[in-house]
Amino acid sequence: MQCWHSLGTDHSLARPGVAVSGLRPAQALLPTPNRRHQAYSLRNCSFTARKSTVMRASDSCEMLKQYKGAMAVDLPQMQRIRDDFVQQMHAGLAAEGGSSLPMIPTHVDILPDGHEHGKFFSIDLGGTNLRVMYVKLPRGHGKVDVVEYEENPIPDRLRHAPQEELFDYLVDTLMAFADKVGWYRPGRRKMVVGFCFSFPIAQTALDKGTLIKWVKGFDCPGAVGQDVMTLLRDAFHRKKQVANLSALVNDTVGTLCSAQYGDIAENTDTCISIIVGTGTNCCYLDQLSNIQKFPLQHLPRTSDMVINTEWADYTSPELPWIEEDKVLDGASRYPGEHAFEKMTAGLYMSEVARLILVRLAEEGGLFGSDVPEGLRQHESLSTPQMEMAHEDESEELDKVAQVLQDAFGISPTEAPQEVRRQVQEVCALVCRRGARLTAAAIGGILFHLGRDPRANRAAVRRIKSIERGKDPAAVAAAAAAAAGAAVDSVDGSVDLEAPRNVVAVEGAVLRHYKSYLAEVQAAAEELMGRGAIFIEPAPLLSGTRGAALVAAAAKSYMSGLSFYEG
């Protein structure tokens, strides 16, 4: 059976003791008022989920038609989600807790520019695997001479061990790896290390960040509320090792920096990076002038900074909730949180599909008068299996039959072709909804940056109409309001030439689920026009590599030189 390695086995979906095998009466499982993403109340706007009830029907075909309507994300709705996303971006950049989007300043305001050279390491702690990497940068622009890495699954016991055990494991793994690549020799300077830490943090400097909470099935005592770089330094000290820990990033930020480093050689422009795997997140490069909540005492080194949106938490009245989403949310480890992630990411999509199939079986007789017992088993369908069923092009839908047997123990004779077709359609519905929501959020970021070509064309139309009045200030204001375009305050001229928008993508869903990626691209073009964005896979292990590159840039800057000899 197909398996996406990077999705791995993550037990963070269900809370202990909460059964989600089948549907129960829908209760108030939407976000509770004390949750951070209930920020709508901060703006005097109560949260109400879109009505999308699927009624009991005479057969599963009729119910499936209702699901199509309830889960559809058409162009007008994508536009509404985009507009709401933009508003919440602005609110999140203005104040802490201002919206469901945390919009965390990463303090990554110096990106690698191709002048760095030397030898650098990185540690990448993800939801499933621990990666360590060695990077050698030669003199040159945007080139990597040597990349060696090692990847190991994180032992289950360490997910709940005291933080000292987890961080000691990180150091032990890195030092053993450094020995393998021949790092040690007399007179060698201490290694420069970047730390890729893919958990929610409140970052206060490039090398400082406080853990907000554990996610992805981790719950290591003693870490929440602590600076994770200090915890890592303490582990190096306990192991009697020395290292220059110069940069803290998450996987999304690392992916953006890695892709932008490649832009130097390719002459392209990556403005956003997205991860969709077990979970999802997005980051982008913004102007410091847009970050109103940023501390005044910060001394900027450049005019830009990478913003970590933490868009997993995004919620909106426009999101197309169905009853199955509410059931999944209420039974998850994090009820009332990660609304956007639960509709778009690999950990959850297949479970939503399974819950829909349960209801089609219970109320629509999808599998006849009995509901197969295996279908009620929590998380019995994986997202790789969902992808396999969705993309089955065989005449008899043989792969769908295989998935039904492997996931639920339903034999091919119990699943005739019409049943298989409906199962495939459910998988397609869940995939399409997630992809189109992702595209709408991408559209929101590009609109905020003034890089949405259709918004720029709208600015042109408004400018032409106002130009008849010969008022340069009004022309400039119209352009800025319509598209966020760059305005020259002297003569009111506007640069409306849309740059090439490259979105770097990473994560098992975007790398392996071809239909998901194709749906994102198609929906983005529907929203912004053909050729508006170019979605491109990031370099492999880009988050891990990006951490090393940011560490290299930070070391180069701090040394006051354009290079560093390791």
Image (cartoon, helix red, strand yellow):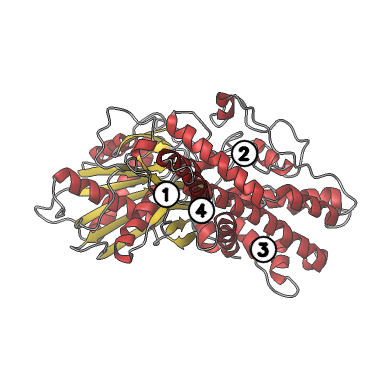
Q: Residues within 10 Å of mark 1 (few under 14, many from 20)?
A: many
Query: Which of 77/518 is in front?
Result: 77
- Mark drawn on residue 390: 3
Residue 395 image position (x, y, % from top left): 74, 75
Q: Residues within 10 Å of mark 3 (few under 14, many from 20)?
A: many
Residue on which the image places disc 4: 457
- CB of mark 4 within 8 Å of CB of mark 2? no
Q: Answer yes or no: is residue 193 visible.
A: yes
Residue 519 image-quadrant placement: bottom right
Query: Which of 298/353 is in front?
Result: 298
**Amino acid identity at mark 1:** Thr
Mark 1 or mark 4: whose residue is earlier in sequence? 1
Mark 1 or mark 3: whose residue is earlier in sequence? 1
**Amino acid identity at mark 3:** His
From mark 1 to mark 2, how far is it between C-alphas? Answer: 24 Å
- Mark drawn on residue 332: 2
**Amino acid identity at mark 4:** Arg
From mark 4 to mark 3, how far is it between C-alphas? Answer: 37 Å
Residue on which the image places disc 1: 252
Q: What element carries label 2?
A: loop
> With respect to residue 400, does 494 lie above or below?
above
Report the mark closest to the observer, 4 or 3. 4
